């Protein structure tokens, strides 16, 4: 059987492949596999309508499961986003404000998941599942509370050579498969597998020719963005993500899309190997983006950290195990927070949501229900510190743009070295009139009444476009900064 035919049978759920590879005739145990991918923009995934075939493997998986078209992360940062997925809670429960330091203090000292917080892994472990985590970022470590509930936790290592890191996928996948092969096929299991490859690609000093040539740059994205001296900055390519040379936004986008395609190819090989163990059909597989990545739509270039759709709107695909008898191949518009994944997976396994878990189960959406499980999703944090409230049409953002750290970040936003620590930005984005993924356009102040009267959440529209030190969305802030980059994003 050819490799392509094997993959075809695998993704269509053919029983022949599983039956032929089932060791010693053992009945496979129940499996739950969560694959979390950093920096995966929803509008660059072909299963969501992107015009480039970036994700054929994920597309096959989507046709076997449910695609959540309105899923949002709780934070555009790596530690809080993963904390949400593992706990089903708002990440603020893990945030520790340094005493008397305001928003200052080392990043790594500000995050720790308390022992009392519920965990998806703990609930499954208590119900007979073996559990393992295979993470691809050194900040996600047991010392910060990420390991609770996992019998085995494989941490990432800091690497001095960017080239040594680019294919970390292979290392993470190999560790996961070795762990799984060490357990009897009949055992129930849960694995959390995390890939950071799409972040790492920008740190290459020598470009990956294969990824760069998968897709041709778009002619309309021929503008060349400036390169900053700082590592975190608005309206320019950060120094830490510049690999030398002069590249257009189209070339950067082509590299990103090519990197997604390479990651997708590796996912295909992973699923083929999993299928050969006989476990795949009895496993619920989740593909989830933890946060997005900007091409200038929200002011950030090749970076994440804003409260706009470019960073918060993420892909979420749930392929239920065949044993559950759930419908396959559908799409739901049900508003979903990444907090909801843990309680959803628990209900799929017939388990109750533990006390203190904030998310709501989206089991109804998987069962074909059109009744939404929630009306609002929330996100917080980011480079500018603040929060946003999102419903099916509106997004209200409030952020302290003057508190951006380090100082070059604030300077790149305002275009000066004045003290903007008291400035805040309040913006109301109406997707019905402005489908953009960024928040650099002016606030819809003339429609504030619509939010107050029809949209839930923020009562009376208080603060939208008002208040001392207000920074308008694009009017008072971004347009002061030199070298602003026009939005790229292709499918965005």
Image: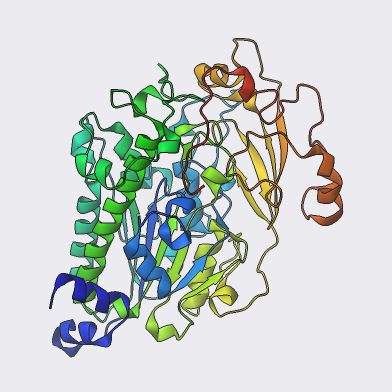
Does residue 234 appear left or right of residue 156 in this picture? Answer: right
Does residue 199 appear left or right of residue 311 in this picture? Answer: left
Instruction: Give the vertical position of 321 relative to 274 (above or below).
Output: below
The residue located at (52%, 60%) in the rendering is: 118
- Point out residue 422 in the picture as x, y percentages from the top left corner: 71, 21
- Point out residue 323 in the picture as x, y percentages from the top left corner: 39, 85
Does residue 486 appear left or right of residue 54 in this picture? Answer: right
Instruction: Identify which residue, 337 or 354, lies in the foreground.
Output: 337
Instruction: Identify which residue, 442 or 104, lies in the foreground.
Output: 442
Kindly tell me whether residue 253 is visible in this rendering. yes
- Point out residue 237 in the picture as x, y percentages from the top left corner: 42, 26
- Point out residue 390 in the picture as x, y percentages from the top left corner: 67, 51
The residue located at (18%, 69%) in the rendering is: 181
Instruction: Identify which residue, 132 or 388, lies in the foreground.
Output: 388
Q: Quadrant of the N terminus?
A: bottom left
Does residue 34 appear left or right of residue 463 in this picture? Answer: left
The image's colouring method is rainbow
Kindly tell me whether residue 137 is visible in this rendering. no
Total labels drawn: 0
């Amino acid at each position: 059987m050819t490799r392509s035919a094997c993959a075809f049978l695998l993704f269509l759920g053919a029983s022949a492949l599983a039956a032929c590879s089932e060791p010693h005739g053992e009945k496979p145990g129940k499996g739950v596999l969560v694959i979390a991918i950093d920096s995966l923009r929803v509008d660059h995934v072909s299963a969501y309508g992107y015009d480039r075939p970036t994700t054929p493997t994920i597309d096959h998986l989507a046709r076997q499961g449910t695609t959540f078209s309105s899923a949002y992360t709780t934070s555009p940062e790596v530690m809080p986003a993963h904390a949400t997925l593992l706990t089903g809670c708002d990440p603020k429960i893990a945030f520790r404000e340094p005493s008397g330091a305001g928003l200052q203090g080392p990043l790594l000292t500000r995050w720790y998941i308390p022992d009392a917080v519920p965990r998806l892994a703990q609930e499954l472990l208590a119900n007979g599942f073996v559990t393992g985590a295979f993470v691809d970022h050194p900040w996600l470590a047991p010392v910060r509370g990420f390991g609770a509930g996992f019998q085995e936790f494989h941490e990432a290592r800091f690497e001095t050579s960017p080239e040594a890191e680019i294919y970390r996928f292979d290392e993470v996948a190999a560790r996961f498969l070795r762990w799984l092969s060490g357990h009897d096929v009949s055992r129930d299991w849960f694995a959390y597998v995390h890939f950071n490859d799409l972040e790492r690609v920008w740190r290459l000093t020598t470009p990956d020719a294969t990824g760069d040539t998968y897709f041709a740059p778009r002619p309309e994205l021929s503008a060349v963005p400036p390169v900053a001296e700082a590592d975190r900055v608005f309206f320019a390519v950060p120094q830490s993500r510049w690999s030398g040379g002069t590249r257009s936004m189209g070339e950067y986008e082509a590299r990103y899309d090519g990197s997604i395609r390479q990651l997708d190819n590796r996912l295909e090989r992973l699923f083929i190997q999993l299928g050969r163990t006989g476990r795949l059909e009895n496993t619920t597989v989740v593909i989830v983006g933890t946060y997005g990545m900007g091409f200038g739509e929200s002011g950030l270039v090749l970076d994440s950290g804003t409260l706009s759709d470019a960073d918060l709107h993420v892909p979420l695909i749930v392929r239920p195990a065949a044993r559950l008898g759930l419908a396959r191949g559908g799409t739901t518009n049900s508003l979903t927070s990444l907090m909801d994944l843990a309680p959803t997976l628990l209900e799929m396994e017939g388990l109750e949501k533990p006390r203190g878990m904030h998310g709501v189960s989206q089991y109804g959406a998987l069962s074909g229900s059109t009744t939404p499980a929630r009306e609002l999703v929330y996100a917080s944090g980011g480079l500018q510190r603040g929060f946003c409230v999102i419903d099916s049409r509106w997004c209200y953002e409030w952020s302290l743009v003057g508190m951006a750290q380090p100082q070059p970040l604030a300077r790149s936003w305002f275009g000066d070295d004045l003290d903007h620590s008291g400035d805040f930005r309040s913006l109301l984005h109406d997707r019905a009139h402005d489908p953009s993924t960024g928040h650099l356009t002016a606030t819809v102040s003339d429609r504030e009444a619509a939010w107050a009267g029809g949209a839930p959440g923020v009562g009376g529209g208080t603060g939208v476009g008002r208040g001392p030190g207000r920074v308008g969305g694009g009017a008072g802030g971004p347009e002061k900064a030199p070298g602003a980059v026009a939005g790229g994003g292709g499918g965005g």
